[in-house]
Each structure stands twice: as structure tokens, then as C-alpha cells.
Image: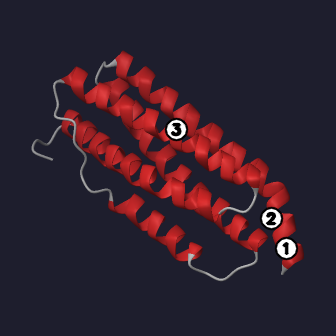
Amino acid sequence: MAENNLKSVFVDELRDLYNAEQQLIKALPKMAKAATSEELRSGFEEHLEQTKEHAARIEKIFSGMGEPVKGKKCKGMEGVIADGAELMEEDAEPEVMDAGLIGAAQHVEHYEIAGYGCVRTYAELLGKTKIASLLQKTLDEEKATDEKLTELARNINVEAEKAA
């Protein structure tokens, strides 16, 4: 952070989220490929398109604020994705792999929910209502994805338990 004020924290956190979205754009196709459940694979593919929209929203926010469109390395997302990549290298039954992929994806979603909740609140405090609205839309979509993953887990986790 170049300055020590809420706007600099806001911009710094947006850069972090932008990089997180970029990392996720690279990770989701690998997760989709590793999924054996057609519903889960389809969910990852749909979320990839949504993630691209999330990144585009952040680009729009940066442009509207006159800030350069760039990210800073998001170490949190890097770690969450690395954990998921490690899981995909395991030799597991297909149902067990799918259950693990859901867990990894929910770690991603919870990280994003926390981040978008913070930047939305910062935008509100800074009086940036249009930006706050865009960020709320992304936050709502991330929460909806987490709920879809929970629904998928209800069946997939039972199948994984039977496969063990």
C-alpha cells in the first residue's frame, strides 16, 4: 500500500482479488477435467465463465477509478489452489476425488466471499455506491456457487463414503 488510508486498502484488496480470479481462471479447467461427476464438471465449467465475468468487473472498477488494471500476487488463493492441485495428484476412487474437489472448491469460494465482502464494505464507506453494487453482485454469485457446491456434496459425499 502506497498510502495508509481506506482507499489504498480498498485498491490493494481489489488487486489481490483480481489476481485471485486470474489464478482461478487457470485452475478451474483442471478441476473440471479431474471431476468424474458430470454435474460437478459442468458446475466448474459454468463457474469458469462466471469467474471471467468477475475479473472483467474488477477491470471495469479499476478503469472507472483511473487505477491501472493489475493484480498483486494473491498468496492466499495460491495456497488454496495448491492444496487442490495436490489433491488432484492423489490416486483416489472417482467419488472420493469428486468429494475432495468439492471441498477444495468451497475453500476457494469462502476465500472469495470474505474478500468480496470486505471490498464491498470499503466501497460503501468510501461512498462508491455503483462500485459497491458491482461488488455485491459478485459476492452474491460467489455465495450462490458455494450453495450449489453444498447441494452437490449431499449426494457425492454419500457416494464417496460408500466407495471407501
> In terms of sequence position, does the residue under pointer 3 or pointer 2 come before the other?
3
Relative to 132, say whether 145 is above or below. below
Badge 1 marks a residue whose secondary structure is helix
The residue at the point 22 percent across, 42 percent down is: 70
Visible residue check, residue 92 = yes
Asked if labels 2 and 3 touch by Cβ distance under 8 angstroms, the answer is no
Q: Residue 67: percent from the left, percent from the top?
A: 17, 31
Q: Residue 38: percent from the left, percent from the top?
A: 75, 53
How far is the residue under mark 2 from the one under mark 1? 6 Å
Number of the front mark, 3 or 1: 3
Classify mark 1: residues with Cα within 10 Å, few (<14), some (14-19) or many (20+): few
- Quadrant (top left, top right, bottom left, bottom right) of the C terminus: bottom right
The residue at the point 48 percent across, 40 percent down is: 51
Horizontally, residue 121 falls left or right of residue 50, namely: left
The residue at the point 24 percent across, 37 percent down is: 11
Mark identifier at residue 145: none
Mark identifier at residue 161: 1
Badge 2 marks a residue whose secondary structure is helix
Residue 7: name its quadrant: top left
Badge 3 marks a residue whose secondary structure is helix
Instruction: Name the foreground residue: 73 vs 50.
Output: 50
Q: Which residue is mark 3?
A: 49
Relative to 81, say whether 72 is above or below. above
> In terms of sequence position, does the residue under pointer 3 or pointer 1 come before the other?
3
Mark identifier at residue 157: 2
How far is the residue under mark 3 from the one under mark 1? 31 Å
Asked if labels 1 and 3 touch by Cβ distance under 8 angstroms, the answer is no
Residue closest to the far right: 162
Q: Residue 121: percent from the left, percent from the top?
A: 40, 31
How far is the residue under mark 3 from the one under mark 2? 26 Å
Residue 46: name its quadrant: top right
Number of the front mark, 3 or 2: 3
